[in-house]
Image: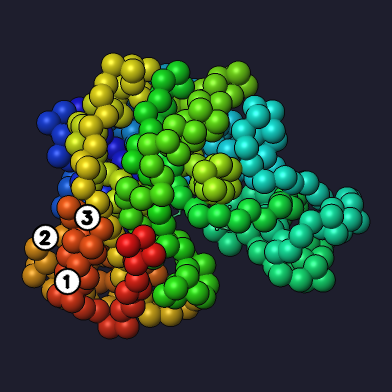
Amino acid sequence: MNILLLGSGGREHALANAISKSPSCSKLWIAPGNAGTSTCGRNVAISSTDFSAVASFCVENEVQLVVVGPEEPLVKGITDFFSADDRLSQIPVIGPTAAGARLEGSKDFAKSFMLRHGIPTAAYGSFTAASLSAGYDFLTTLHPPYVLKADGLAAGKGVLILDRLEDAKQELEAMLQHAKFGAASSTVVIEEFLHGIELSVFVLTDGEHYKILPAAKDYKRIGEGDQGLNTGGMGAVSPVPFADADFMKTVEQRIVRPTVEGLKKDGIGYRGWIFIGLMNMDGNPKVIEYNVRMGDPETEVVFPRIQSDVVELLSATGNGTLDQHELRIDPRTALTVMMVSGGYPEEYEKGKVITGLDRVSGSMVFHAGTSTDKDGNIITNGGRVLAVTSLGADLAEAQATSYASIREIAFDGSYFRRDIGKDLE
Ligand code: AMP
Ligand code: GLY
């Protein structure tokens, strides 16, 4: 099978790695990819949101399956674009239609979807500039901290958590009246704050059947002990010790099944991943958010644990036969540590030469933000640079291996958290 994977991060390197290992994969292209993905297939210099260039490439190269990594092409309707074109409609796209992608693209839509289908989530209200004073009133009914979310995509920055009511009111005004996050904050969801432990649950669905992939825990803050600014993710662990079989059964009954059924009831065709950000509140799961893609860096610990043929699973997702396939999972623990550029998530420099990658053994190094310079050196090309993943008999072993591998790798200004997985020991 000829496969095109869209995206360029650590998630895509981990996906490309799993896809390329399948005996069913004949050719793999990654658009645009990074220095890591070029070891799994061929990178092609096409942006994942340039739909007509993606379409021409698929026709010319007899692509038989398109796998979408990031949310942006999905929210912009790549799946609908393919099904509307006679030359492309036979090529399954793994990722929902624009209607399904609203689960991630609009917080207001996601909240009303959960309400409509009885899926547990934080209490909320939704406001626009015209209802600003109702928004102030709603805030006064809540206990601090206050959670404000821009309705639309805001490059991961659209969620504010504020301790003081006055600050919450000011930020609400900035979002609604002064377009703090541009058009994304013309509607704002105000939510009850949920106390508990967070985890990421991943579902692969063909619209009818589903498989629950291994759960993962992500470390979002830049600093050790979960201090400092939010990032795209500084590390991840799978499995999550507190997500035991009983808890996952509850998640399936209260959340996964009603979500897949709800999409069907709403007439939303959905073939792809659903990433459910959950709060475990003393055994009671509540949904924090939906994403319509895999997580990053969660993919870097989830996919190394999937032993089933990933291309078979993805093809089955495309043709509605996921129930005929078995999901086999490696019982070992996977742990990844993200090496980032100094300064990230604020300003940082790019173009630093990365050394020592060839000295790493025992870990998988997934490239997140890398490219190759004119002399063939691998250089940094983003805030998050490398995800160093190890499998171990237990958490401590996986952790020790990843940190030993990191000691071999160097680039100017590199930073990583030294406490990934420590809270789970
Ligand atoms: P999101 O962009 O929706 O993932 O939100 C970013 C982060 O804010 C989440 O991963 C949570 O850590 C936190 N968060 C969002 N909503 C809530 C909530 N209602 N209660 C507590 N924490 C939240
Ligand atoms: N690691 C969180 C995300 O991918 O959104």
Relative image position of residue 135 (x, y in whole percent): 84, 54
Look at mark 2 in the image and give the residue it sits on: 362
Residue pictured at 31% horizontal, 79% vertical: 414
Relative image position of residue 65 (x, y in whole percent): 30, 29
* CA–CA distance in space, label 1 to label 3: 16 Å
Given the image, on which type of amino acid does mark 3 rest? Asp
| Mark 2 or 3, nearer chain start | 2
Look at mark 1 in the image and give the residue it sits on: 404
Q: Nearer the viewer, residue 170 or 354?
A: 170
The reply to whether residue 51 is in sight is: no
The reply to whether residue 227 is in sight is: yes
Residue pictured at 50% horizontal, 53% vertical: 198
The N terminus sits in image quarter: top left
Relative image position of residue 187 (x, y in whole percent): 75, 50
Q: Secondary structure at mark 3?
A: loop
Within 10 Å of disc 2 (Cα), the crowding (few <14, some 14-19, many 20+) is some
Within 10 Å of disc 3 (Cα), the crowding (few <14, some 14-19, many 20+) is some
Relative image position of residue 421 (x, y in whole percent): 33, 63
Residue pictured at 38% horizontal, 42% vertical: 244
Q: Secondary structure at mark 1?
A: helix
